[in-house]
Amino acid sequence: MSAYAMTAGKPGAGPAHRISRDTMRRGVLLAPALLLVIGLVVLPGLWLLALSFIEKGHFSFAHYERMLTYSSYYRILIATFRISLVVTLICIVLGFPVAYLMAQLPARLAVVLTVLVILPLWTSVLVRTYAWLVLLTDGGPINRLLLSSGLIQTPLKLLFNETGTVIGMVHVMLPFFILPVYSAVRSFDWSLMQAAASLGAPPRSAFWRVFVPLALPGVAAGSVLVLVQCLGFFVTPAVLGGGNVTMASMKIASNIQQYFDWGAASAFGVVLLLATLGLLLIAGRFVSLNRVLGPA
Amino acid sequence: MRKYGLVAAAMLLISTAAARAEETISYLTAGGVYLEDITKAFLDPIGKKLGIKWSLETGDVDTPIRIQVQSGAVTTDIAEFGASTCAQGAAEGLYEKLDFNVIDTSELAPGTFSDYYVGSTIYSTVLTWNPKTVKNPPQTWAEFWDVEKFPGKRALWRNPRSVLEAALLADGVAKDKLYPLDLDRAFASLAKIKPHITAWWQSGAESQQLLREGGIDMILMFNARAQSVIDEGGSAAYTFNEGFIDYGCWTVVKGAPHKDLAMKVLSEFVKKEYQAQMTVLSNYGAANTKIEETGLIDASLAPKLPTSAENYPKQVVLDADWWAKNGAEAQERFDQFMTE
């Protein structure tokens, strides 16, 4: 982000042999934020990387070798990304209509809806997760309702598997998707839709060819936000997965406790970080990340 | 001059008063109900007796101690963990050698102390079931593994400790021939029951939740957790038969700021008066074998205690040293097993 700000728009740069006062002032203003990011993100990240090559005080590839010896690491990584992608997709399908509705409502109603979207964020994730435990069980309200309505004959397996994990995670992540999308479409100029209609576009194609492309930066921002947070989930898969689901952070926690060696845990952390960056790079080929991460 | 003399005298007074002020012992232990009971049974009376204050930290893993010792900035004086964590930490030099001139171990059960730690509470992981849904409950691990004769939803601990032992007992290994654990055989046996395990719990609170609201019919869980479900009016029953005994232990952290005082605290911690009080409050057994002599232990309490004369012989004592040495490999294979 900082690189974006530094390179963007320097029309009034002074002569080459001295830094313009403008640039200097900008640098001074940026310094605190830059120092914070370097001190709290970059340096610890590099330290994590360094630790992953140390075992019992010596340089070693042991932590990476272990990940190749036990296929569980590979499976956990795949499961982590699979669950996170599914949650993100469901958030898009469920969240986009909500944001669309919010954008169309009069301001006062939109505020009410915004509060309703944010409200769950004020409740602890742990509490919400345990609430799902009660709702999703075989004899819980959801299965009872479906059974008594005759839609199903045997209770659906909604708990202690990936299904339950995904349901719980979608519930936690939805606000993180809806809010960026809403902020992107809130200022949408609805006269564009009328213009499309006056040029002969039926409502559906006006929606797809005018509204959706303009909402896309918000959708991309929300998706990245959801996806990256999902990759680090711990409590929800631990409880609703009933031990049958292992996500990367759970294995990292287990390694810290088992090996008493930061390296064992940081090596898997490094792999997760690289895999995440790789995924973002691939995503960046389809959606401009600058539009997602930079100023909207 | 006289003025200065007065000031000096006043300063002297202040400094001696400061020296007499209570010292603070920093103590790391498990949180929740356990901490409440520990506070009532040990910290309040001993704090008063020795004139010390407590600074409390809570947690189940020794990572904070490891960081303190490695970085040379030790702030914790006394730490309490499970037995294999104590044994492993002792092997790695995380703890001070205990001064047995100060601490009297003569009343502690054999195997619940070493040069580096002394036993606190004794607990057991036991076969538990919901008597409302299970009319013919399994009484051994072999029966728990028998899904035909004993139908019902099952749950186990997502942890190799005691689960591998249960798998070996179910496969016909004798109680006294368990160690060293045959990991291949244990995982082969565990693989047979895995398709029938609905949930694997990860915290004690979760195991209670599974039994109460999770629709689980039979489960391996801590005895005091099962008992508290019963005490709160829930539907649960358990047997100590083939339960797995484990114990908590107190250590003095290497380089502790109040090392000598910490030894003195441990010498109080192991006394039967306090340990008996802890048993009364918590339903945990005590490392001190003489707690009955205090007259605090009611006869009705005995059937609930893993350490009672009747219950103790039915169980298996987990081998802390084996787990200290092989815990990491067992855990890695267990995690592997869980993703297969």
Image: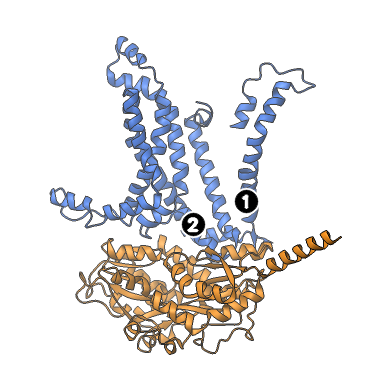
Among numbered discs 2 and 1, the one appearing first in the sequence: 1
Name which residue type carries label 2.
Answer: Tyr
Residue depicted at 60% across the width and 28% down the height: A4
On the question of residue B325 being in view, the answer is no
Q: Position of residue B25 (x, y in %)?
A: 60, 69
Q: In the rendered view, does A158 fall on the left or right side of B107?
A: left
* Callout 2–callout 1 Cβ contact below 8 Å: no
Q: Chain A drawn in what color? A: blue
> Given the current orientation, which residue lies at the most extreme front position?
B2
Q: Position of residue A216 (x, y in %)?
A: 42, 27
Q: Position of residue A29 (x, y in %)?
A: 66, 29
| Residue position marked by numbered label 1 in the rendering | A49
Residue depicted at 37% across the width and 52% down the height: A127
Q: Nearer the viewer, residue A257 or B181?
A: A257
Name which residue type carries label 1.
Answer: Leu
Q: In the rendered view, does B81 fall on the left or right side of B175?
A: right
Labels 2, 1: front one: 1
Q: Nearer the viewer, residue B252 or B274?
A: B274
Q: In the rendered view, does A170 fall on the left or right side of A15?
A: left
Structural crowding at the residue carrying mark 1, measured as other residues with C-alpha within 10 Å and reported as few (<14), some (14–19) or many (≥20):
some
Q: Quadrant of the N terminus of chain A?
A: top right
Q: Chain B drawn in what color? A: orange
| Residue position marked by numbered label 2 in the rendering | A73
Q: Chain of mark 2?
A: A
Q: Secondary structure at mark 2?
A: helix
- Choose top left, top right, bottom left or bottom right for residue B239: bottom left
Residue depicted at 63% across the width and 48% down the height: A44
- Choose top left, top right, bottom left or bottom right for residue B68: bottom right
